[in-house]
Structure formats: structure tokens, C-alpha cells
Amino acid sequence: MNTTSTDTIIFSPGRINLIGEHIDYNGGYVLPAAIDLKIKFRFRKKQGYICVVTSESKGSLKFDINKKLITTEGHWGNYVLGVISGILKLRPGKLEGFECTFKSELPIGSGISSSAALECGIAKGLNELFNLGLSDYEIIEIAKIAEHKFVGTKCGVMDQFAVVMGIKRKLILLNCETLEYDFIDADFSPYKICLLNTNISHNLSTSAYNKRREECELSLKTISKDYPEFKNLANIPLSIIEKYKNKLTPDIYKRAIYVSMENTRTKKAAEMIQNGQLKHFGELMYQSHEGLSNKYEVSCDELDFLVDFTKDLDHVIGSRMMGGGFGGCTINIIHKHSVKNFIDSISKDYEKIFKIKLTSIIVSTSDGVSIES
Ligand code: GLA
């Protein structure tokens, strides 16, 4: 599609999360940021009610706004249809035919939220094109529910929140119970944020993700019978959870311990970053990974290998898996002078052991979804 003056151009970024993994749907604190890798969309109105959305690499999706929206198992278009469905509910009769093309810089399945970038970009573009008057919070909610209902992942709010609300050079300390948030400076100098993509995405990720969520809900249900003041698992102190060692199954007990500890770590991490105590923050990243691997059990050999590799290296101050898990990326904080050598050596060893190429991405924080001015 060639650009004309009537086109609406949208940029929608991916996100990183410094710490606070699997905490959003448990109502605790997370520390994400939008990043400088994005999806670029062009939107244009089209006569009638037929809509065509085209991914430059994955083909087209065509549907009629007035007919039942039909999903196809595993298809990227489900994210789009979910957003359309959400908008039709909130703003009935406001959508008409449109064309949209998009091109993505975000590797799919790598844990940097290409899906939230797609959902939020579509919602923001249609909001602008049809003057829907949706607030940022409505866009975040539409995008999240699209994922629940049209994709089947019962995700939390972190990804969509970061994609919409991100600000350049800032991290978002988000309380997922209240949706209150603070921006804190993302000043890691002289270190860089480097993502290492395992380039694997285990297909159990959606079912295992939903299972973890159910396990957490179960432990909350048991504990809140005695402590009704807790509405979310992340806010239950460790000392209370420990009383339930024999009342929860071993797996569910481990999940609850992880969630409480990770929430505490995230609050501490935000303080440490603000105070410039980056090495201490790095230690919390390793603790987070250890919990995700052994207690929450969402890591895999490839991610564990990448984190272990960094442990004795002075120029890496922290490393952990990022996102839902079972593949995707690790996030690493590396001294700027050592980035190249580090990537060369870890890539060689990774490829030797797993016979897969490792990809590295140096990222910076950026603004959230935006309209080209
Ligand atoms: C995925 C989900 C998020 C969050 C992370 C884990 O990215 O979409 O809501 O739960 O996993 O922290």
C-alpha cells in the first residue's frame, strides 16, 4: 500500500521486563519498559465493511465487520480479530471497512511481546482512524482480553501496559493490583541491556502458562480462607505462605513461594536501580531466574545455559529469563566494552551445545505506541 496524506501511521513497540516475572496476574509489582524495536502500521479507510490486514511477512487476513469473526488455530490474525471484537463491544456501530499493512521488527515467540505490540497497534490505529475516543486504559484492556478470548492465553496486564504507556529512558514500576505506576530512570550506564534469543519457543507455553495461573489461583483460594484481606497472591508475605507447606501440594506451594519472593525482589530492585546500586540489582536478577527455573518451573535447558554462562563473568552484572518462559530470550546487563566479545563467545558455545543459532539484540527503552506526526 502506498502512503497518502489520509493514511494513519502507527508505531507500536515491544517490551522488556527487568524483573517481576509472572507477577502481573498475581497482582504484584512488575518493572517493564517499551523498547526501540517496533511494528510499523499504515491504516486507511475503505468503502463498505470489508477489512484487510496484511503482514508484510505473513500474508493477509480478510474479514467483514458485520459478520461473525472466525479464528484459525495458531494464526497471527487472531490477535487482530480479538481487538476488533473488543472495539465492536465498546463502540458498537463505529467501525467500518479499512485496510492496514504492517511490518514488524519484533521476533515472534521471543518473549518481547510482539503480540501485545500487534494488538495495541491495531487498537490505537483504529481509535485514530474512526475517532473512537478510546482511552489508554481501554486500549490496554481491549488488547488483554483479545489475548484471553481469541488466543487463549490468560495473560496479565504487563505487556499491553508497557506497550501503551512506555516512555523513553524510563522503566515503569507498575502495581498490577491497582494499576498505579511510577516512572523510574532507566539509567544503566556504563552497562547495556542485551537480549539473547534462544530461538526456540516450546509449544507447551500457552497451556503451561494458563496452568501456572490456575495453580496460583488455587493457592490464593486456600490461603485467603484464613486471610480474606489478601486479594492477590503476590501480596501475601512469605511468612504466611510458609504456614501452608502441608496444606498445599508441593508444586502449588513452590509456585506461591516464588510469587511472594519475586514481588518483594521487584520492589527492592526498583529502589536499587534508583540508587544506582546496579550490582545488587544484578544479584536479584539471578535470584529471579533461580526461582523461575526451580520453583515456578517455566525455564528450559537453553535459557538456564545462557544464564549460567554469565554467572562468573565480571562484565555481566545480571541475567535471567524474560517473559512467559519455555524459550524466548534472556535479559542481560553487560558492560558496554565487553558486549561484542561476550556475544561472540556465548553464541559459539550455545550453537555447539544446542545446534541452534543464538541471536542477540541490544535494546534501549522507548516511547509507547504512537501516531506519526
Ligand atoms: C507473558 C504475559 C504477561 C506476563 C509474562 C510473564 O508475557 O503476556 O502478562 O505474565 O508472560 O511475566
Image (cartoon, rainbow, N blue to C red):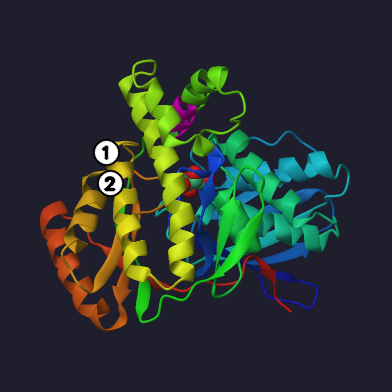
The spot of residue 122 in percent (x, y) is 67, 56
**Does the magenta segment cover residue 213?**
yes
Quarter of the picture holding the C terminus: bottom right
**Cβ(mark 1) to ligand 1 < 8 Å?**
no
- Mark 2 to mark 1 CA distance (whole Å): 6 Å
> Residue 272 sits in which quadrant?
bottom left
Residue nearest the viewer, comparing 38 with 270: 270
Q: Which mark is residue 294?
A: 1
Query: Left or right: where does residue 240 sit relative to residue 84?
Result: left
The residue positioned 62% from the left and 42% from the top of the image is: 177
Judge by depth and name the residue closer to the eye, 1 or 369: 369
Disc 1 element: helix
Q: Position of residue 319 (x, y in %)?
A: 30, 60
Judged from the image, the secondary structure of the residue bearing numbered disc 2 is helix
Viewer-side residue, 84 vs 241: 241
Say which residue label 2 marks: 290
Q: Is residue 111 above or below residue 45?
A: above
Q: Is residue 101 left or right of residue 74?
A: right
Q: Are marks 2 and 1 in contact (CB under 8 Å)?
A: yes
Three-letter code, disc 2:
Glu
Quarter of the image for residue 59 reads: bottom right
What span is in magenta? Answer: 207-216
Residue at 30%, 59% in the rendered image? 283
Residue placed furthest toward the bottom: 337
Mark drawn on residue 188? none
**Label 1 Cα crowd, 10 Å radius (few <14 / some 14-19 / many 20+):** few
The three-letter amino acid code for the residue at tag 1 is Asn
